[in-house]
């Protein structure tokens, strides 16, 4: 399963990527949304895990852009408590997927990635 | 005017809330990094128990990361503490360079979210003014929010200060040249109310916002 991680906290996103890699996922991580978009343009992913508050382009806007490139891509959002209200306000508009509150539980994240990847028609 | 209708009182509460939310978000990020670093150590130890070799250098790097993140958290909490104490006294002697650094630190995440750079050019010598620290912070923050939406092509807002008669002049530079009070986003009501409290004057134009802050002993 191929997973894309995006969060502007480099030490957080790189460590999460390492932990997911140890659990058998193929993971690419990015701190900048435009770099992540370029990766989605060039590579098929099963699940994208996005921070809600990403500088320059919010997580929900990034999701919309990624969906244009890979309509079958599934999403998990990570949010701090402070951004939960903002996130919920944008859910209807963006059709957002599952979300986890930081700091995330790695086993819950792992299970959710597997679950979304296994959903019918998700594999490229 | 009651507090419920006073734009400066309402703006002050909102400002306090925004800073508290931003600081809690920052602390949350620090905690998340520490938690994942500890989690990765646990993962590596679990693999070691199953017979895989343990890399001491990897552990040293993770321990260093946790140490650096605690230093980061300490700085965040110190700033929040200083900010919280700015409401202790209605008027006091304010060291303007330190206040600019505080506002710059508190505004870094907001600037980053907007793709802007925020910097301070502190005065070369200590510059003090007797004023309301919280009202000055509120005025500066209100100007900063406006400036971050109206930066020029360099996307860099710089805060600086210099003496001006018996008071100080604080300048936010880096705005688009045409930006002025006529802009529909200009926070006129709040800034006018804060100006009344500080007895200060806010000027906008020529790529900058300038706050003329009088010494309240004068």
Image (cartoon, coloured by chain):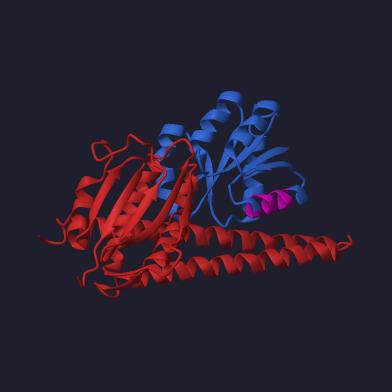
Q: Nearer the viewer, residue B147 or B112?
A: B147
The majority secondary structure of the magenta stretch comes to helix
Q: Where is residue B208 in the image (x, y as percent from the top left)?
A: 35, 45
Q: Which chain is red?
A: B
Please say whether residue B161 is one of the residues in the magenta stretch.
no
Figure check: A12 above or below B69: above
Please say whether residue A15 is one of the residues in the magenta stretch.
yes
In magenta, the rendered stretch is A11-20
Q: Which chain is blue?
A: A
Count of marks placed on residues = 0
Q: Where is residue B23 in the image (x, y as percent from the top left)?
A: 45, 61
Tell me, yes or no, if residue B158 can be seen here: yes
Residue at the extreme left: B1
Residue at the extreme front: B165
- The quarter in which the N terminus of chain B is drawn is bottom left
Q: Which of A101 and A34 is in front in this view?
A: A34
Q: Name the residue at 89% across, 62% down.
A: B53
Tell me, yes or no, if residue B14 can be seen here: no
Question: Which of the 4 image quadrants contains residue B215?
Answer: bottom left
Figure check: B90 above or below A122: below
Q: Position of residue B173 (x, y in %)?
A: 40, 47
The reply, left or right, for residue A27 in relation to residue A82 is right
The reply, left or right, for residue B128 in relation to residue A50 is left
The reply, left or right, for residue A61 in relation to residue A16 is left
Q: Where is residue B205 in the image (x, y as percent from the top left)?
A: 30, 41
Q: Name the residue at 21% across, 69% down.
A: B216
């Amino acid at each position: 399963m191929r997973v894309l991680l995006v969060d502007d906290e480099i030490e957080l996103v790189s460590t999460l990527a390492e932990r997911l890699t140890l659990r058998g996922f193929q993971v690419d991580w990015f701190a900048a949304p435009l770099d992540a978009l370029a990766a989605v343009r060039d590579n098929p992913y099963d699940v994208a895990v996005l921070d809600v508050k990403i500088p320059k382009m919010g997580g929900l806007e990034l999701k919309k852009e990624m969906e244009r490139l890979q309509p079958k891509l599934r999403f998990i959002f990570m949010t701090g408590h402070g951004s939960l209200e903002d996130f919920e306000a944008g859910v209807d508009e963006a059709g957002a997927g599952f979300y986890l509150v930081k700091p995330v539980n790695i086993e819950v994240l792992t299970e959710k990635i597997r679950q979304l990847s296994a959903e019918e028609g998700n594999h490229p | 005017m009651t507090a419920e209708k006073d734009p400066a009182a309402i703006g002050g509460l909102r400002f306090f809330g925004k800073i508290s939310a931003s600081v809690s978000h920052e602390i949350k990020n620090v905690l998340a990094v520490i938690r994942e670093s500890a989690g990765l150590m646990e993962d590596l130890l679990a693999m070691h128990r199953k017979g895989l070799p343990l890399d001491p250098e990897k552990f040293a790097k993770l321990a260093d990361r946790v140490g650096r993140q605690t230093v980061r958290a300490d700085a965040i909490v110190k700033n929040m503490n200083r900010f919280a104490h700015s409401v202790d006294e209605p008027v006091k002697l304010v060291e303007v360079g330190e206040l600019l650094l505080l506002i710059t630190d508190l505004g870094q995440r907001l600037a980053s979210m907007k793709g802007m750079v925020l910097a301070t050019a502190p005065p070369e010598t200590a510059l003090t003014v007797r004023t309301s620290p919280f009202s000055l912070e509120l005025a500066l923050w209100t100007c900063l929010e406006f400036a971050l939406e109206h930066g020029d092509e360099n996307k860099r807002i710089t805060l600086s200060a210099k003496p001006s008669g018996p008071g100080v002049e604080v300048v936010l530079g880096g705005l688009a040249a045409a930006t002025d009070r006529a802009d529909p986003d200009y926070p006129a009501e709040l800034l006018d109310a804060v100006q009344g409290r500080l007895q200060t004057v806010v000027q906008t134009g020529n790529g900058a916002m300038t706050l003329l802050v009088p010494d309240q002993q004068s």
